[in-house]
Amino acid sequence: MKNLTELEIIESVKRGNQTDFTLLVDMYKDRAFSLLKRLLKNEMDAEEALMDSFVKVYKSLPNFRFESKFSTWFYKIVYNTGLTFLSSKNRRIDNETSSIDEYFELGENDDEIYAKAENGKEYLLKLVDKLPPRHALIIILFYIDDLSLNEISQVLDLSLVNTKVLLHRSRNGLRDMLLKHNYQEEIL
């Protein structure tokens, strides 16, 4: 079987080749699961939301008009599904404009987490997990998934300016965590 491009896969699914949808699932499942796990802070909830996301994507795929990149459209569905999942479980997303310091105080076992981390990147990702959901998501989408600020603003449904501000605050919060616990030398 030849390697199909994302566009060819989407067109094939739109023409009725349902089995080709598994190719899209394989392309995006790991990153989407990672995003949902960071948002929901629970693997089982993330798995359930991931399944819901793929069902929504499959049902909505005939309406995809290529006005944006597929990945942007896909992440927006995943993110919104995660938010819906949070609200349906009566969880509250904290106000992002309040002081970020109160969200990511490192706990007693954080030195142990650092000691067990195999490398700086692994530990840094564990610190990102301690950020509020939106802050963690923007770091992951920008640095790990390589989405542009425009794409992230579409996914998070924020203006470009607010997206830049959120990324700036997220970076500063992460930097402050590193400085506060003297881990910057090990990470940098």
Image (tube, rainbow, N blue to C red):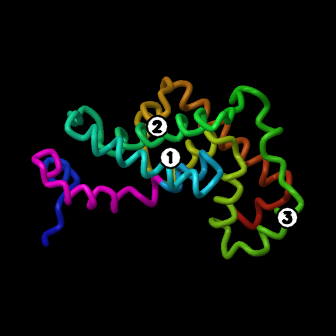
SS of the residue under disc 1: helix
Please state which of residues 82 and 106 is positioned toward the viewer in this rendering: 82
Answer above or below: position of 4 versus 88.
below
Contact between labelled residues 3 and 2, with CB atoms less than 8 Å apart = no
Q: Is residue 90 left or right of residue 7?
A: right
The image shows residue 107, relative to residue 153, as above or below, that is below
Q: What's the amino acid at mark 3?
A: Asn
Alpha-carbon span between mark 2 and mark 3: 32 Å
In this rendering, would 135 be left or right of 105?
left
N-terminal label among 2 and 3 = 3
User: Relative to residue 175, is residue 80 drawn left or right?
Assistant: left
Q: Position of residue 97 (x, y in %)?
A: 71, 26
Would you say the residues marked 1 and 2 are in contact, meaning their CB atoms lie under 8 Å apart? yes
Q: Amino acid at mark 1?
A: Phe
Residue 29 magenta-drawn?
Answer: yes
Q: Which residue sits furthest front?
A: 89
Tell me which label, 1 or 2, sits earlier in the chain.
1
- Residue ID for mark 3: 109
Relative to residue 13, is residue 59 depicted above or below?
A: above
Of the numbered discs in the image, which one, if any, rests on residue 152?
Answer: 2
Q: Are marks 3 and 1 in contact (CB under 8 Å)?
A: no
Q: Which quadrant of the figure contains the N terminus?
A: bottom left
Which contiguous range is marked in magenta? 12-32
Relative height, residue 187 to residue 15 (above, below): below
Total labels drawn: 3
Q: Amino acid at mark 2?
A: Ile
Could you tell me how far apart the alpha carbons at marks 3 and 1 are, in whole angstroms?
A: 28 Å
Instruction: Report the residue that reaches farthest toward the left.
Output: 15
Quadrant hosting residue 163: top right
Pointer 1: what residue? 142
Secondary structure at badge 2 equals helix
Q: Residues within 10 Å of mark 1 (few under 14, many from 20)?
A: some
